[in-house]
Structure formats: structure tokens, C-alpha cells
Amino acid sequence: MFIPWQQLSGTALNGLVDSYCTQLHGLCSDDGLDSLEERRRQVMQALRDNRLVIRWSESEQSAWIVDPNMPEKN
């Protein structure tokens, strides 16, 4: 299930964005070219543009940022 990013608290959204930005995939690869602040900006823009979404897993009671075309894990 996807959750609109606008429905999250600022703290929750920032936590998800920071977690995504420190991973080695997506818009924020560890290439050393962009600062963490620039990576945060890129992820937020991708959320606004629906190029990234927030997926919630009821079974795992967890949320993370993903490509909306990525299949769900079973």
C-alpha cells in the first residue's frame, strides 16, 4: 500500500528521506558527487513528481521509499 508523503509528519518524512539517502541505490547512489542536503532535495522532488513513493507494509509494520513501479515483496 502506498502512503501519500503529505500525510506523514515532518519528522517521519525526514527520517524516511534520510534513510533513503544513505542507502546505495535510487537517486542517491554513493557517488560522492552530491551533498546529503542535495540528495534530500532530489528525493523530495521525486516524491512530489511521483517518481518515488512511500510504501507501507502492514505485515512488517514498516514504511520505505521506493520506485512506484517496483513490485511488492511477498
Image (cartoon, helix red, strand yellow):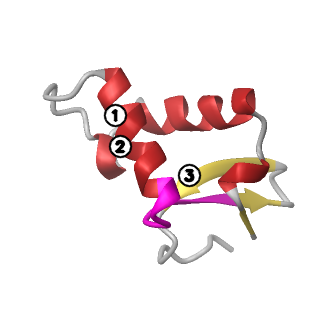
Are discs 1 and 2 less than 8 Å apart at CB? Answer: yes
Whichever of labels 2 and 3 marks the residue nearer the N terminus, that label is 2
Q: Is residue 36 left or right of residue 16?
A: left
Labelled disc at residue 51: none
Disc marking residue 42: 2
Type of amino acid under label 3 = Ile
| 15 and 70: which is toward the camera | 15
Q: Nearer the viewer, residue 48 or 57?
A: 48
Q: Is residue 51 above or below residue 8?
A: below
Q: Quadrant of the N terminus?
A: bottom right
Say which amino acid is labelled 2: Gln
Image coords of residue 4 (percent x, y): 71, 60
Question: Alpha carbon of mark 2 to alpha carbon of mark 3: how far?
Answer: 13 Å
Q: Residues within 10 Å of mark 3 (few under 14, many from 20)?
A: many
**Please, what secondary structure does the residue beneath circle 1 have?**
helix
Magenta segment, which residues?
A: 47-55
Q: Is residue 14 left or right of residue 6?
A: left
Work out how far the residue at label 3 is from the one at label 1, CA to CA, in angstroms.
Answer: 14 Å
Name the side, left or right, on which 70 lies relative to 36: right
Badge 3 or badge 1: first in the primary sequence:
1
Label 2 element class: helix
- Counting from the top left corner in percent of width and height, residue 36 is at 34, 23
Type of amino acid under label 1 = Arg
Q: Which residue is mark 1?
A: 39
| Residue tagged 3 | 65
Residue 71 found in image quarter: bottom right
Q: Is residue 32 on the magenta stretch?
A: no
